[in-house]
Structures are given as structure tokens and as C-alpha cells.
Amino acid sequence: MKILLLHNYYQQPGGEDIVVAQEKALLESKGNDVRLFSAHNNTIKGIVGRFRTALDSIYCVHSKRELDKEICSFQPDIVHAHNLFPLLSPSVYGACKAHGIPVVQTLHNFRLICPNALLFRNGKTCELCVGKTVPWPAIQHGCYRGSHAGSAAVACMIATHGLGGTWTSSVDAYITLTNFSREKLIAGKLPSNRLFVKPNFLFTDPGRSSRAGDYALFVGRLSHEKGISTLLSAWARLRENAKLKIVGTGPLEGFVHEGAKNSSIQAIGHQTQEGVMNLIDGAAFVIFPSECYEGFPRVIVESFAKGKPVVASRLGSMAELIDHGRTGLLFEPRNAQALAETIEWMFANSRQVQTMGEAARVEFETKYTADRNYWQLMEIYARASHGHA
């Protein structure tokens, strides 16, 4: 099968980039012919560049033209789009439609129904724009990077293609990462009969850890929506010998380093993927205290693969991915005291934590391996092709 992948890389590498690379490797390992058509936000320069990008995010003639050439050259059986914002834009769907190529779109976030893609504002989840043809609240509150103008541009993209029928007529199948996300996207007026759930996966099984671990681990962006403030507040309430390692960078990096002056906390900064897996291997459990809904946190699956349970917020995708009491524990989001009590229990009950880790490993083997993911993906491709025909 000839598969053309589309992806717009962000300026700072993230989980979506890893998913695209792993999905490409998986498809190729099964004998498919795969090409990647991409753009990179590093090419956006200066005020003029940002202004042009804002317009192009609605409809980019250049991207459509270049993709048209790529399709003529490669002659794919299917086009699988990941992130199109802002440089590729929904204009690429038009190129696919002109050539009669079925389109699959993975929705890694809530961009099609929320200008900031997170359903998160002022430290809390927010659904004011869900279901609105024109997401006016996002413009009013400057939800996209704190900019009213930027928010207006993204809102215009959502409204233009919603009113023009792009979301309902130009994409043959959408991939959502959890049932929770699927329900939110349906509430945002995406067609339910084209929304299929397929989780992320690990292309290479790292193998279960043989170490019990003596510290808790946080891996993620150091920002408000990831719950890092709640985590540090919770840690201040714990016994002194409880150890925490924090991996990641972001706007709250200085705040984290200040908190790490406590000798029980170690701020490690950015790590390679191999480094992250080694740290998970040595952890007793992983903490994911996010305060937004999330799409599909890869660190949860990585932890499960290593046989490590996860402590996470009872919110959004986390509440769906973690079976409370079996593969980890859930706590009330933004509640530092509840998190502190949960962490205390995890450190005090090593045998139960080990049992949770065993269940987490079974969960990985059942749902998140490369082989299982491949057949799920092939089924969605088949449905998209059938629906297109």
C-alpha cells in the first residue's frame, strides 16, 4: 500500500512528532511504501511571517499546490494527515479531493473545536467554544497564545471550514485517541460515523522493568496545564525522604528549580527518549497530574510498558486510560492535598504498587503494542477507502 503522511512540525518537538515517526516506521516495517510530506514552524520569521502564516492557516494555496505535485509524483492509495496547523492548512484536503484520494486525519488535540486546542483557559478546563460555529469566546479571551488577533485567525479557520463543510465532506475518517476525545469532538459537530478510536502505541517494546524503584517520576512540559504547581505543592506536604525526579522544560522551569532546592526533588531538564525510558525503569511509579483533558499522554503508555503504575488526575483521557486501583490511582485534579495523600499511600504500599505495575504491563500488551495498532490502523484505512468510494 502506498501511504502519504502529512505533518506540520512545531517549533518545539513534542509527542505528535514522535507518533508520526513511529507510525511511519511501523507502516514501513509491514512492507508499505510510505512518504512524509511536511512543513516546519521554524520557517516562520518576523512579524510579516507571522501575519502571512495567520492567513495561510485558513487556506494555504502554496501547500495545496506543493501537495498536488507530491500526489502526482507518488500516486498514493491513501493520505493520512496529522497536524496541519498552521502551514499546511485544510487546503491540502482539496488537493486530495481533486485526485480522488481518500483522507484519514488523526486528531491529536481539540484544534478543530477549540482555538487553543486544549479546551483549557485560566487554569481550568473550558468548553465555551464547543459546538459553536464561530468560536467567539476564544477571540474575546485571547485563548490562542494570549493574542486576540491570533485567536481571531484560528477561530476564522475553524468557522470557515465548518461553514464550508470541510470537516464533514473532505475527510473520510478521523482517528481520535480516546473515547473521551471522541465524545468531545462529536459535541463539537464532527461527524460521529467518521470518528474512530485508535490509541497511540510504542513501536519498540522496551520490556518490563525488573527494578522496584525508589522514587516518583514526572515527565512532561513544565507548564500550568500539566499540573506542575499542584505537584510541587503536594510534595511540600510529604515526609522528607520521599524522592521525586522531574523531567522536562517549559515556562515554569525556574519555578521548578526553585522547588528543587528541597533535597528530595531533582530537576533533570530535557532528556532523550532513551533517557526517559531509563528513568521510568528506575521509578517506583510515575505521576501525571495534568489539569487539562489531554489527548493521549505517551508517558502513561511508556510507564505501562515498563510495568510501572501511574498516579494521575481523574480528568479527561487520564481517567479513561488508568483503571483506578488496578493500573494506578486517580486523584481529584488541582487538589494538592489529595495528591499528597495518594503519593504517601504509593510509597507506603510497595506490594500493592508492584501488583498494579504487573496489571499495567498486561494493559500495555493488550492494547498498546505495535502489532495491535497496525491492524487497527489498516481497518480504519479500509473504512476510509470504502467510504470514499
Image (cartoon, grey):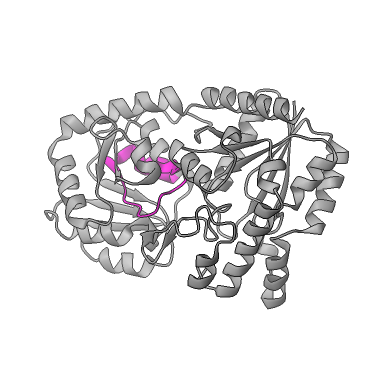
**Is residue 300 something one can see in this rendering?**
yes
* Residue 90 left/right relative to 152: right
Of 42 and 331, which appears nearest the observer? 331
Q: Position of residue 52 (x, y in %)?
A: 73, 69
Instruction: Answer whether residue 110 is magenta in the image.
Output: no
Quarter containing the C terminus: top right
Residues in magenta, as a range: 275-299
Q: Position of residue 302 (x, y in %)?
A: 41, 37
Question: Residue placed at 70% from the left, 58% from the top?
Answer: 87
When the figure is inspected, residue 267 is found, relative to residue 323, above or below; the finding is below
Q: How many marks?
A: 0
**Is residue 144 something one can see in this rendering?**
no
Q: Position of residue 204 (x, y in %)?
A: 51, 30
Q: Position of residue 10 (x, y in %)?
A: 60, 57
Question: Residue placed at 76% from the left, 59% from the top?
Answer: 60
When the figure is inspected, residue 368 is found, relative to residue 72, above or below; the finding is above
Quarter of the rendering containing residue 179: top left
Question: Residue placed at 25% from the left, 60% from the top?
Answer: 232
Instruction: Answer whether residue 283 is magenta in the image.
Output: yes
Quarter containing the N terminus: top right
- Among all residues in the image, which is located at the extreme bottom? 47
Quarter of the rendering containing residue 133: bottom right
Question: Residue placed at 13% from the left, 56% from the top?
Answer: 240
* Residue 325 left/right relative to 322: left
